[in-house]
Amino acid sequence: MAAKTLHFLGKNLKVGMSTQDINDMCHAYTINRGGIPATLNYHGFPASLCTSRNEVICHGIPSPKDFLKNGDIVNLDVTTIYKGFHGDTNATFFIGDVKPEVKKLVQVTYDCLMAGISVCRPGARLGDIGAVIEEMAHGHGYSVVHEYCGHGIGRVFHEEPQVTHFGKKGTGIEMRPGMTFTIEPMINLGKRHCRVLEDGWTVVTKDKSWSAQFEHTICITEDGHEIMTTFSPQDWTEEDDKI
Ligand code: MF3
Ligand code: CO
Ligand code: CO
């Protein structure tokens, strides 16, 4: 449900829309399907998803005064509770004509997520994830945010272990079948340092450089991993296009 909600929102983004409009779509889409938006009132977070534009790294609060402009990038981070379990996924979308340099940042950030996922299997270590992500990001001259990380997830939104997006191969706890956690690298065009705005939530880059992120919830299986926050195109029905 989280994956379909994120896909629906991405399909319905338009120049001139406010991030509050996105929030309202997310809220209705989730509730109408028997889900609960996990971020709403989570430690006081006031909205049904996070919307993070341009230099906002994560935890952007939807607002009726925050509009999507041509050339922007916006990350939508959807977390849905359904039948007692959490699905957490995010993606960065292009609004209109985005500069090639920014497009490349977004593409590489997606590749960082998929590289991190690709090393997940029983016997691998959590540090293997951070190592491949860091290597890829640095290879393109980008930086990796250190202060926020992936996390164990299930009946609880955020739990152990912390899944950092930097690290050393062969270190950290060993992956075992049944472990379920997110990977959600935040990659900056400039330096890695961040600060939190006065609202207590919005995380921005210190140097105001733009930042991208992608996230999946994954599960370790007997012979590798399963991405839980995805769906096959044939599983998208006409019903899924309705709020
Ligand atoms: N979905 C975010 C994550 O990936 C967490 C958002 S918590 C909120 O972990 F309170 F900021 F909404
Ligand atoms: Co998460
Ligand atoms: Co998330």
Image: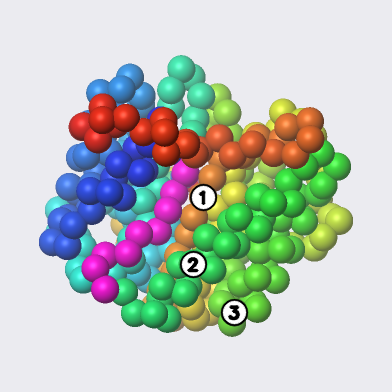
Residue at numbered disc 2: 107
Instruction: Decide whether residue 91 is among the magenta residues.
Output: yes
Q: Callout 2, which amino acid?
A: Gln
Q: Is residue 201 visible?
A: no
Figure quadrant of the C terminus = top left
How crowded pointer 3 is (Cα within 10 Å; few <14, some 14-19, many 20+) is rated as: few
Secondary structure beneath dot 1 equals: loop
Q: Secondary structure at mark 2?
A: helix
Query: On residue 215, which mark appears?
Result: 1
The residues colored magenta run 88-97
Label annotation for residue 140? 3
Q: Residues within 10 Å of mark 1 (few under 14, many from 20)?
A: many
The quadrant of the picture occupied by the N terminus is top left
Whole-number angstrom distance, CA of label 1 to CA of label 2: 13 Å
Main SS type for the magenta part? Answer: strand
- Identified by mark 1, the residue type is Glu
Q: Nearer the viewer, residue 44 or 205?
A: 205
